[in-house]
Image (cartoon, rainbow, N blue to C red):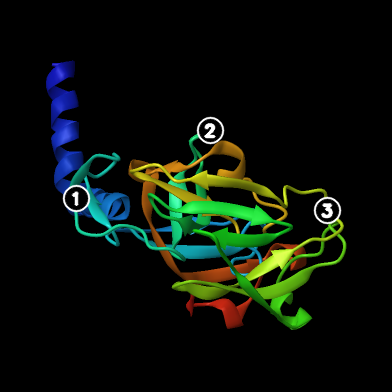
Amino acid sequence: MKENKGRERLKKLWRENKSLLITVIILTAVRSAIADWNDVPTGSMNPTIVQGDRVFVNKLAYDLKVPFSTWHLAEWSNPKRGDIVVFFSPVDGLRLVKRVIGLPGDQIEMANDRLLVNGRPADYDPLSANTGRDVPPDKDGLRVYAEEKVGEMPSHAVTILPQRPALRTFGPVTVPAGKYFVMGDNRDNSNDSRFWGTLDRNRIVGRATMVVISMDRQHYFQPRWHRFFSSLI
């Protein structure tokens, strides 16, 4: 009798909440395989992405995956130099956000904070201090903002921290097949491919394309309205 009553309660619960449960399952699957957002708690992508930003992740930018997995059903594109990608860290499995600097076969090196791609050095143009107006204060001292341009990679802002001990020179290294070299735009404060090596293609979740919302954690989570729905370059 008790078992029958239990079954009846479950059936009633299903009938009353079926639509809601199906909706939750569909939305969860969509978030897993098609689109998502990613909270950014660190400053490794300053000034492009700052602490408190939530970025939209297009999971269909490169491929289609089985929901709730990293298994690829189909691939129609690959990351390009300059793309901002979200991926599972090869160190601890956490989701990180970095910029693709090197493609399979590329040779990457740095000399005194100057990036070289396939032997071609990047050009740097100074940017005003206003570029980092949303970057929270810290103990890194002087910040220098510059626009980095190299080859066909879209130009983008980077941060240099002259007073911080950092890996400013490395390489050259050649990116193996099926892997990518990623770096943070905050060049002197980013744990990236310079430290843990190149990134496997199958670890990439998708491409970050815009800041959806931005909350200033230093000021009681006040909205940074000017960053809402801003495109990422």
Q: What residue does disc 2 label?
A: 92
Circles 3 and 1: CB atoms closer than 8 Å: no
- Amino acid type, mark 2: Asp
Residue 221 showing in the rendered view: no
Nearer the camera: disc 1 or disc 2: 2
The secondary structure type at the circle numbered 3 is loop
- Amino acid type, mark 1: Ile
In the image, which disc is placed on residue 128? none
Q: Where residue 229 appears, x then y in whole percent?
A: 48, 77
Say above or below: 222 vs 89.
below
Q: In the depicted view, which residue is nearer to us: 64 or 185? A: 185
Q: CA distance from mark 3 to mark 1?
A: 51 Å
Q: What residue does disc 3 label?
A: 164
Q: Where residue 224 appears, x then y in whole percent?
A: 63, 76
Q: Residues within 10 Å of mark 2 (few under 14, many from 20)?
A: few
Q: CA distance from mark 1 to mark 2?
A: 33 Å
The secondary structure type at the circle numbered 2 is loop
Q: In the depicted view, which residue is nearer to us: 24 or 175? A: 175
Q: In the depicted view, which residue is nearer to us: 182 or 95? A: 182
Nearer the camera: disc 3 or disc 1: 3
Q: Residues within 10 Å of mark 1 (few under 14, many from 20)?
A: few
Q: Residue at x 69, y 56 (%)?
A: 111
Q: What residue does disc 1 label?
A: 22
Q: Is residue 130 left or right of residue 115?
A: right
Q: Residue at x 50, y 70 (%)?
A: 211
Sequence order check, earlier mark of 3 and 1:
1
Q: CA distance from mark 2 to mark 3?
A: 25 Å
Residue 216 lies in quadrant: bottom right
Q: Residue at x 44, y 43 (%)?
A: 199
- Amino acid type, mark 3: Arg
Nearer the camera: disc 2 or disc 3: 3
